[in-house]
Amino acid sequence: MTENPSGRDIYGESYDEANEPIFCGIPSFLKLPQVDRDELSEDGADIAILGAPLDTATTIRPGTRYGPRAVRAASTVPSPPYRHFNIETGVDPFDSYRVVDTGDATISPGDTKQSQDNIEEAVGEIAAEGATPIIIGGDHSISYPDIKGWAEANGYEDVGLIHFDCHADTGDDGLCGFEYDHGAWVKRIYDSGLVAGENYTLIGPRGYWPGPDTYEEMAEAGMKWYTAGDVASYDLSAIIEDAVQRATDGTDAVWISFDVDVMEPAYCPGTGEPEPGGLLPREAITMVRDAVTQLDPDNFGFDIVEVAPQYDVSDTNSYNGGITSGFANRLIIEVMASMALAEDGKTIGEPIKPKEPLGPQGDLEAPADD
């Protein structure tokens, strides 16, 4: 990763400039530099954003093909370019990493398997160039080629998986009999031998799919899950501590996959399969931050999937991004910031604090009468 001490060294004068209105120009992710995948090492890129706009493996409501475009649009928020100092965690990922946008993997409309192969190749190219891949989906079927391409390029044989989702996605043949649909990708990875059941944790399932037989098979395989109700009942840090321990036990690297349908649809309605009773944004952000700070940023990958912007209740939250896309964008920045903290062996940066401690300070003396 980049050893430069500040974002100004990494990005030059553009780090401080904000001359172009945010609604102008080409909307790359955060208006970051656009770099071809075969030029990442030459560019010195540490993290590479890739879009995977595939939704032909969706079984109910399509539309996630527009997810990468919407999340990029949502990233043009009112902030100076490249400067994202988080007031809660006290870290700016762009002081640690050179992040670039590599565009989208090639999608062949109507040919789901070929599209997935193309995604696998694109992610593998990013990993082979020494950059950490962050993928914007697309339906959840893309996670199989994401993880496969990343693992093969890095020579990983055993991978840990932390999976945020409303659904287990462990069906033998998905929801409708297609083995590569968005409800079967975990089973494809498990069957490939890349992820053992003991290294897999699912966070946030609820509702009615998959059925009891599948969950019994998951239990027999050593898989573990915390339902959305468990998230509300348990200490969040304890859940993540367990998930991280499982994901790192004897593995070479860890992938986090985040499906936005894990969220309460009142906050993230822009997805193909909304289910009431999901996670709150603060819960999700807190858990993702906590998990990533405990992982090795040099052996890590992340994808966020199932953003379907046409189902959002608003398309003006982040300049044509929509509220679900805005959340996805925010989560990616949180992941990068947590990677920067992990790089320095920290769990929190240097947030600016009030001079006076928080909370009531006792009885204050009334001003004396003149």
Image: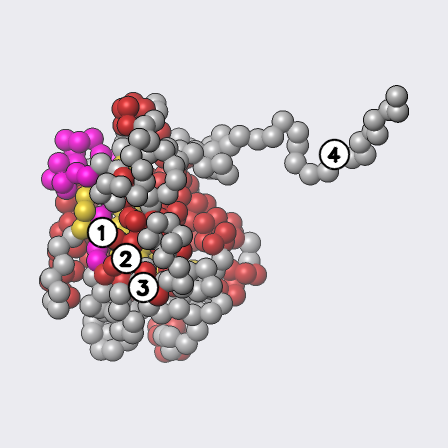
Disc 2 + disc 3, Cβ < 8 Å: no
Residue 182: percent from the left, percent from the top?
26, 67
Instruction: Please state which amino acid type lies under the numbered disc 1.
Output: Gly
Judging by the rendered image, the residue that carries numbered circle 4 is 361
In the image, residue 345 sits, relative to residue 289, either above or below, namely above
Residue 127 point in image, percent of width and height:
19, 43
Mark seen at residue 51: 1
Q: Nearer the viewer, residue 161 or 61?
A: 61
Choose top left, top right, bottom left or bottom right for residue 17.
Answer: top left
Which numbered disc, 1 or 3, marks the residue that appears first in the sequence?
A: 1
**Numbered circle sitting on residue 310:** 3
The answer to if 47 sits in the magenta stretch is yes
Give the residue number, with chain letter if any, for mark 2: 67
Q: CA distance from mark 1 to mark 4?
A: 50 Å
**Which quadrant of the figure contains the N terminus?**
top left
Total marks shown come to 4
Residue 63 placement (x, y as % from top left)? 26, 65
Please name which of the two marks, 2 or 3, marks the residue nearer to the observer. 3
Amino acid type, callout 2 = Gly
- Considering the numbered disc 1 on the image, is that residue within a helix, a strand or a loop? strand
Estimate the x, y position of residue 35 in percent, counting from the top left.
17, 38
Against 288, residue 270 (above or below) is below
